[in-house]
Image: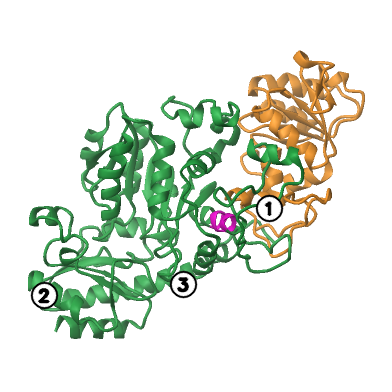
Chain colours: A orange, B green
Amino acid sequence: MNHDSYPADYIRGILHSVKVIAMVGASSNVVRPSYLVMQYLLSKGYDVIPVNPGLARQELQGKTVYRTLKDIPQAIDMIDIFRTSDAAGAIVDEALTLSPLPSVIWMQLSVRNDEAAARAEAAGIKVVMNRCPKMEYGKESGEWAWVGGNSGILSSRRQNMHESGKMQSLGLGVIPTKR
Amino acid sequence: MTDQPPGFDTLAIHAGAAPDPSTGARVTPIYQTTAYVFNDVKHASDLFALRAFGNIYTRIMNPTQGVLEAKIAALEGGTAALALASGHAAQMLVFHTIMQPGDEFVAVRQLYGGSINQFNHSFKSFGWHVVWADAEDMDSIEKALSPKTKAIFIESIANPGGRITDIAAVAKIAKRAGVPLIVDNTLATPYLCKPIEHGANIVVHSLTKFMGGHGNSMGGAIVDGGNFDWGKSGKYPLLSEPNDSYHGMKFYETFGGMAFAITCRVLGLRDLGPSISPQNAFYILTGMETLGLRMQRHCDNAQKVAEWLSQNPKVAWVSYAGLPGDPHHALQKKYAPKGAGAVFTFGLKGGYEAGVKVVSSVKLLSHLANVGDTRSLIIHPASTTHSQLTPEQLKKAGAGPDVVRLSIGIEDVADIIADLDQAIG
């Protein structure tokens, strides 16, 4: 995978397919990006499991925090890494010991570790680096334009409201025409 | 569909403008509302604290405005945009986000007169100090820099003389100085020139001009290039430091490549308030769908008018970068190869009286103080917009007694030339 520029359907395919996301580096500080991303992904119906040794066994946004990935008692579809690029290597290696393996490892905006990505891809895991799933969901759903963002997506098809039925919330219901 | 990037005209029509999610309306609706209901109390508090995307109040955002912003951002190749009441409002919010009292910014003298006034007078009362340089002399820009400099400001195609600025050369100076380059792209529009591709960090627009293009709506815009590190120097605390009015959120950390546009919205627009009306956003959106068609016609017509004027025995000189002998012709070929724009000046051998006679005698061209309309426009600065200046000041401002400014429209060019012919006499 070329991690400088992802193909049109790659990110969308991941956002459509994953359900359970382990967030490594989840924060209890309400203005930290990890807190905001966790909140957003929960609101879109993803099951987000926070991982942070400093907050282990506490509740964060209604979810139990785990010390490590290995402690999570259920299968994980995606690991979202809110740590430094250097720290991401050890997290990927821990992920590679899980059974079953996650299908996606996602490193947040500004986080990139090409060696770790290569190890994960060798094990058949899809990797995204230096992106934010909240931002990408916002682009794919059309919410991005609400704040004047350039999503890079054109569509002549109507975007659906989110399945929660709430106003001011768009979902991924329609696959837009991407150019 | 393929991954082939869409062309300019496709973006002008489709970018940001998917069918309306609520109604299926194909054309972007005019959301003529001041406020939006919340789902519940938590949703409301999340919106106010920027923890969720969503509409609160039209002073800060509006769905019609959002489509306009997304379209402008796509056409300029930026990460995000913010639409505002006017181009002046856009400049005010850009500097409000960058500057603290006592700070300086460097601007070149070759600017729209309204910007010169805003920088010299109104900004001074905020403690923001402009230091003037010359767009023709890169050394003068270097020399104007100081440790207090927070930005450099230029126009891509300068008003009124139609001069082209060497954007990449200025961008290099800005990069070395660690400050953002702000480019007013009003007269070029992204159809002719995309400053971000040449190293600009922020683009501002008066949408009132060619972008809307029909002389019916005021508007302005800020485009975030997403290519400046606001955290590196500590010189931009509004972007890099915790913000007390948002519970200590750091905007650059939270919003990354679109932090500048978001900060202008959630601080500058929230607190200073120059929002665009949804109705005006709609008119400008409609105009922008034909931006490429119109700009090409504007430029083609302007080229022919400039060529005709340069052959007219009563005309002393023509300042249009599209003319092969013009000092800015090489820069035009580099930065705006599809055309040199449609706003330029010429001088009459008859001086002040001849200028007054021309604007008094036109029958098709409109004598008024605007540019970038479908209609051809004409003004004699020395007897109108600049009449309070001394002869020396007039000369410095590029508005000497003989100067006539044109904004060439998209009428049949033979009719524009015929009208100028009878008016020059």
Say whether marks 3 and 1 touch (CB < 8 Å): no
Tell me which amino acid carries mark 3.
Answer: Leu
Q: Amino acid at mark 1?
A: Gly
Query: Pointer 3 indicates a residue of which chain?
Result: B
**Quick check: do tags 3 and 1 share a chain?**
no
In the picture, residue A100 is in which quadrant?
top right
Q: Amino acid at mark 2?
A: Ala
x, y percentage for residue A143?
Answer: 67, 50
Query: How packed is label 2: few (under 14 Cα within 10 Å), some, or many (20 or more)?
Result: many
Residue that numbered label 1 is attached to: A142
> Of B4 and B418, which appears nearest the observer?
B418
Q: Do pointers 1 and 2 mark residues of a single chain?
A: no
Task: State the extent of the magenta-drawn residues as a range.
Answer: B65-71
Q: CA distance from mark 3 to mark 1?
A: 28 Å
Q: Say whether residue A74 is left or right of residue B419.
A: right
Q: Which residue is mark 3?
A: B293
Q: Quadrant of the C terminus of chain B?
A: bottom left
In the picture, the disc for residue B354 is 2
The location of residue A82, given as percent across then percent down, is 69, 26
Distance from Cα at disc 1 to Cα at disc 2: 56 Å
From this view, report whether residue B388 is shown above or below residue B339.
Answer: above
Q: Residues within 10 Å of mark 3 (few under 14, many from 20)?
A: few
Q: Chain of mark 1?
A: A
